[in-house]
Amino acid sequence: MRFLFKTDYDQDIRLFKDGVQMFWYALLGIVLLALPAVLPEYLMGQMVFILIYAIIGLGLMLLIGFTGQISLGHAAFLAVGAYTEAIMQAKGMPFVVSIVLSAVFAGAAGLIVGLPALRLKGIYLAIATMAFGFIAEEVITRWEHVTGGNSGKQLKQIDFFGIIIDNDTKFYYLALGLVVIILLGMINLMRSPTGRAFVAIRDSEISAQSMGIHLAKYKTIAFTFSAALTGVAGALYGHKLQFISPEQFNLLVSIEMTTLVFIGGLGSFHGAIFGAAFIIALPQLIVFAKDVLPPAIGQQTGLQPTVFGLILIGFLIFEPLGIYGRWVKIRTYFSLFPFYRRGMFKRQKSYMKSDRLK
Amino acid sequence: MAQFLQLTFSGIAIGCVYALVALGFVLIYKATETVNFAQGDLMMLGGFFAYTATTLIGLPYWVGIILALIAMALFGMLTERIVLRPVLGQAQFTVVMVTIGVGYVARGVVTMMPGWGTDTFKIVTPFAEQVVHIGGAALALDQLMIIVDTAVLCLILFLFFRYSRIGIAMQATSQNQLAAYYMGIPVRRINTLIWGLSAAVAAFAGILLAPITFVHANMGFIGLKAFPAAVVGGFGSIPGAIVGGLIIGLVESFAGFYLPEGFKDIAAYIVVLLVLMFKPSGLFGEKLRKKV
């Protein structure tokens, strides 16, 4: 067990708490950089998906985990990002410009949805965003001369300052770079007054308002940022798949993205990454399991949604802080060994609180 | 004119199904403040239970339906007891995510059950493929039965909430849990019963819908259109859910005919966005403010 004695206010906002933490993150960085040398090409492709989903996860974490606003329509922003990228690339824009434009357009869409949504709370917001998601999917299907309708749209490989991203290893480094930039940006955002305001709104809108936080303004900012990040992920997603069509952005994708945040762990950056890894790894693990299980169970198409649902329910009941919460417990167990007690993270007994009068 | 009548009629018929699913949402929401995203999947399960009872086992239609309703009520109570009780008191959306998980499991398990699977099934009703002519419009008896059955169910529910002890206890619980608890109402048991009631209502909707859309594992996605219905009526108002369902059904029916292709599927969502923008508490919703 390490004790950190704070002797300086700057210590509160430092990126790394101490040298030990810095060491571990440096090690993680080296492992991540060296990964392509070890993993086969197929797994690198999956790593790229994890990184793309991590960007989505970070965007949604900002909205759900830190600001406490719910969205069930984020697939629409993913679609805006992907289609913007496809159209801009077809017009011959360089990647650096087009991905920024993807973020801007998705952010603008987020702003448009966010503004009327500001009056809504909780479940109404979820339903409004869900409705927006449905409408966006339909618009993409019908607006054929721009989006190609149901026949979809092709994307070429990324040309990153003359380097053609033609394999998963290159794509991996590009996505990794973007994730690191976004992660650093988000960490900075969350220790700025804006980020603190988000957390205050999440914890109690009324007390945040009493402290002088302009609710509408900060909720709009959160919605816009979240949508813009999802737009960036959408651009990468489009390039990774090289083909996009409306049904890739339906409600189930939105729900999957939202569950990512809940399974990963609400209110932590780690959670977004863990959740992304989980969402990508689960189908792969089920494919492995199919070979082991008896064919009567293993060959069923319903196996994946069943397992997914059970894991989601299991986490929500037994580990509300998700994979990150479990990780913290394991870490604490070892750092306190042998003094860890079972009840250490026990939740207080909670009573039903009404959201109706909020 | 006949065209208009026809559209109105089919709109009301499908609206009744939305209304019943929305009614299920509202019952659960009023009592436990949980929005049950698995309501559509409960409806789907109800359809499958009825299919099993009437076609696979071969019971008479009405006996099969009543058995399916009882089975679904038990299933709903079991779900509440096992999955939702442990997360009681958690943040609202955590509970919503649990119901989403329940929906995933229900859709997955249905495709794995022997005899159910991923196929589409038909429940043969005693009044299948019969047509009634009113004012020049041909009305399918199946659709007419949806409207009649929904009206009867609403009447039964109204009498239940008005006159039975359990119904009054449910009303008290949904108005103020703590006060109800102090009055000696077993709030948790009432919550379980409400889940059972809601699941049975959903199953009823599924059985009514079965002659029109057939029974299949993804039938529950129709339940997503019941959200707009519940919101339009004002989440938490039982008459609102019925009226909201009818409005959504009618809007969809007319949008499918008078508006360009594609509007039919999203008409419900456009309506709900407009309602949320201009009247966020819905048509029958109560407006409450927290006092600090």
Image (cartoon, grey):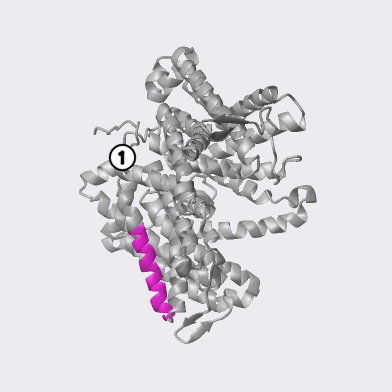
Q: Position of residue A240 (x, y in %)?
A: 55, 71
In magenta, the rendered stretch is A93-111
Taking the image as drawn, is residue A318 in sight? no
- Residue under label 1, please give it: B279
Please tell me which residue lies in front, B274 or A161: B274
Q: Tell me which residue sits at (69%, 22%) in the image.
A: B63
Report the label total: 1
Q: Quick one: quadrant of the C terminus of chain B?
A: top left
Q: Residue A31, position in %: x, y?
A: 55, 72
Q: As rendered, which of B264 and A178 lies closer to the eye?
A: B264
- Per the picture, the main secondary structure of the magenta-coloured stretch is helix
Badge 1 local density, few (<14 within 10 Å), some, or many (20+)? some
Residue A163 percent coordinates (x, y): 50, 85
Q: In the picture provided, is B101 more to the left or to the right than A63?
A: right
Q: Position of residue B136 (x, y in %)?
A: 53, 34
Give the secondary structure at mark 1: loop
Between A271 and B100, the residue placed more toward the observer is: B100
Name the residue located 45 percent from the left edge and 73 percent from the top edge: A87
**Residue at coordinates 52% horizontally, 74% vertically from top-left?**
A155
